[in-house]
Amino acid sequence: MSGATHLTAPGARLHDRAAELAAVARLSAPAGTGAGGILFVTGGPGEGRSALLARAADGFPGAAHRIAAPGHRMPWSGARALFAALAPGAPDARRALRTARGEDGVAAAVSGLLGDLPVLVCLDDLHLWDAHSRAALAAAWRRGRAPGRRGPRWLVSAARHHRLPEVPEAETVRLGRLGPEGARALLGDLCGPPPAPPVARRLVEEAAGHPGVLVAAVRRLAPAQLAGAAPLPEPPVDGAVLTEVYGGFLEHLPADSRRLLAVVALAGRAGEEGAVTAARRLPGVAVDAVLDGARAAGAPVEPLDGLVADGLLRRADGLLRFEDPFLGRAVLASAPVSRHRGAGRTGAPRPARTASALARGERHRADRLGPPAAVRALTPVVRGRSHLVRGLAALADGPVMDAHEALLRAAELLRDRAPAEASDARFLAMEAAWAGGDVGACLAALGCGGEAGGTERDFLDGLGAALAVRLGEARPALARVVARDGAEDDPRLLLRAGSAALVLGDTAAAARIHARALARARAEHRTALLPRALEHLAYAELRDGRYSRAARTAREGLAAAELTGQRNAAAHQHAVLALAASVAGDGPAVAEHAGLALGTARPHGLAQAATLAEWALARDELGRGLAAQAAARLAPLVRAGPRGGHFALRMLVVPCFVEAAVASGRAAEAGAAAGEYAVWAAQGVDGPAPALLARCRALLAQGPAGGEGEGAAYWFGEAVRRHDGCGNDFERARTLLAYGTWLRRRRRPGAARGPLRDALVTFERAAADGWADRARSELRATGGAGGGTADRTAWGLLTPQQQRIARLAAQGATNREIADRLTLSPRTVDHHLRGVFARLGIRSRVELPGMARPDPPAPAQEGGTEAKGLVSSRARRSAGSS
């Protein structure tokens, strides 16, 4: 070979990209996807996303625009770049953005700018666009899905770890590595005369099918090296090559994420300084060891869950490793020299060597290298952050009172040196104590606020006064916190405002504020914060009586908690799902979710989640007529003290206990509980409480045998009247059912039919099938029609949960797939299917397609059929790795 071997322009051809090019062809076809047609392309650094966009733009029959990510990420910088590229002669982007109002306004401006033009817009590196512009683009894409229209097509690329917006019918293709033939073909394109066969084999092997790595490795070689006349560098794919490919990607990661990745990479080094082939992964590192090593090195560990959820790190069997081996080596190559020295065997500063030993799991070496005195010599900020990390870990998946102690210590150490972090630690310590049901520990966390001022001072003072039952003092301070929620953008501060609204009993405001906190956490990609935000929102919706919405939020929260390893949050979401299932009368789902909640709540001291789960079980028992069993389960929950129920839930459980206790002959206990409930209801911190108190008094007046006096009639009338002004239709329907049942038993069937019909209609709207069956039975006993709005066909006799399962089975889904879709166990799905077969009179799922009806239209408001379940974390992981 002559010395004329040279590099040609890369990207002339795309190899091993048949499926991706076919998707681009479908998008570009004249009769393609139509208006708003979108193709998302994801891939890692150097895998060819930009090359595919260039090919699509060159081959599009009409006008095509390629728009790169803006060089800065100020709000609306991406939108300005989009306007400038699409309409350079029109009014400039700044004027368009000034007239637009928020994300919806910019979305409308984008739609108006493009109209029905048959153009292709190629957006590169969506993950580098600012959050405002991404949200506006997603809104524009959804707006453009009008059927029958033709208009702009969008080809959008993003890094593999970026979560793409949900757009109906949008297609996603994932770029992967090249096969051996594709890699050899690319190598041939890169070189003029082909390289020597041994050189080609070595380069293809070292690049392991990564097109960007192969291009960068070839680019650094001289013609003599490609021809085999001079030796190749060792290794051919070294740190310089990987830094060229991955350096830009790493620079755009948050600094804390880069530091944590460096700790994992340094800990996973095998110790050799020689070549590391692409086929050899950095060894797995124990998760606990990484946490200890990061603390010793002063690196934050909060980004760990996000890095795992985004697919940059893989966590399995207690070990962490890089999903992409090249990324791990690139992190090592780009780490500061001092860190490499600190991880070596000699000449390293003691704290750095201690951190590296801890991260590799060599605790015995860490003890020798770093005695306890070295830990005591650390600055208060480093020690405070170490306690903060330990507390966060326990709050996510450990005993919550351990988390409380660690977070309280962190707040004390950081109070004067890092006040923002100290404030977070205080609030989290209070949350841990709240989850554990310890009022004293909550007050201890609130009392260490020091010189806090403004909103934080109001929150600390107001919540402290509320916990000390000084509501007159608490209300003004907490009301100021809620009133200032509109000025807050930080999701953590919004969570505090939502908590203040809940304490005040303003459940609608709490749900609204927590929904804002969730939206901000999503926009900022706060992966580790999402389970907490969803947990708060689900509980607020539950308190507001929006059970189906709470169930939908809880399913999403459960998936997020499982994805990030936050078992405590998952336990709370299981408890919410159990309560929602108790409204629907789905006994198997109640038992399953309550059991899963209690399995974590009991060992971790989650008194709040445990109380919710036990309450759900008791409501299900009461709905099935097992009053004595329900009363026995609820009695401990309404008692005060350390062995009683959760302090914030105890009074909420009382109406259910009174109903069960009266029905099972425990009237004295019911009366005592109702007396305490009356004092609490007078404080005005729960909207439905006056109506529920009147119902309790009506039940006590009638006694277990139905009663003969008119005291019950008066209190039932008062309960119905008070329900009309406080919302929560489900509780109103339960009052009507109790009233109608009492009237029927007093031989007044004509008067009973009205309340029973109203109760039946409400139960059916809320998909509360068990309660609807009770109302229907009582209505039939009065001699009235027992159907309400129910469908009397065989399919209509199925519960909504059975109908959902039957539809999925009719579409060919397996029990496991149905379980993942609806967040159930396969055993529960099998139980429901057996009930479906019995009611429909069929023998197997083969007969279901002829019986199943299409999904009903989504309800316009709360109530009606429950929203679709989210895909489980297992399904997400498998989809993300395909």
Image (tube, rainbow, N blue to C red):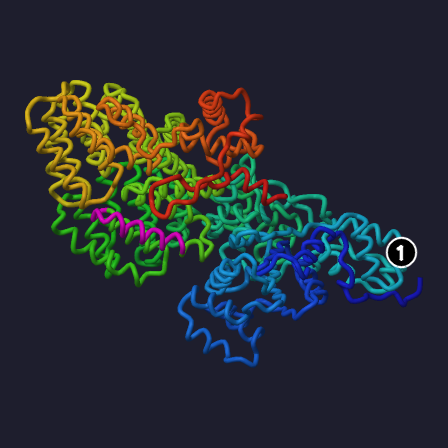
Decide which of 863, 556 is in the foreground and name it: 863
Residue 191: percent from the left, percent from the top?
Answer: 84, 62
Q: What is the magenta range?
A: 503-519
Decide which of 605, 346 is in the foreground and name it: 605
Residue at 21% across / 34% down in the picture? 650
Q: Is residue 233 left or right of 469 when viewed as pictured?
A: right
Question: Where, quadrant-wise, is the C terminus in this rendering?
Answer: top right
Q: Does the magenta run of residues contain 514?
A: yes
Residue at 19% across / 25% down in the picture? 741
- Dominant SS in magenta: helix
Q: Is residue 474 above or below residue 622?
A: below
Q: Is residue 148 left or right of 464 when viewed as pictured?
A: right
Residue 858: percent from the left, percent from the top?
Answer: 42, 45
Residue behind mark 1: 196
Q: Is residue 183 above or below residue 611?
A: below
Q: Is residue 605 visible?
A: no
Q: Tell me the quarter of the picture where residue 282 sits.
A: top right
Q: Secondary structure at mark 1?
A: loop
Residue 628: percent from the left, percent from the top?
Answer: 23, 19
Give the tally of numbered discs: 1
Residue 107: percent from the left, percent from the top?
Answer: 47, 65
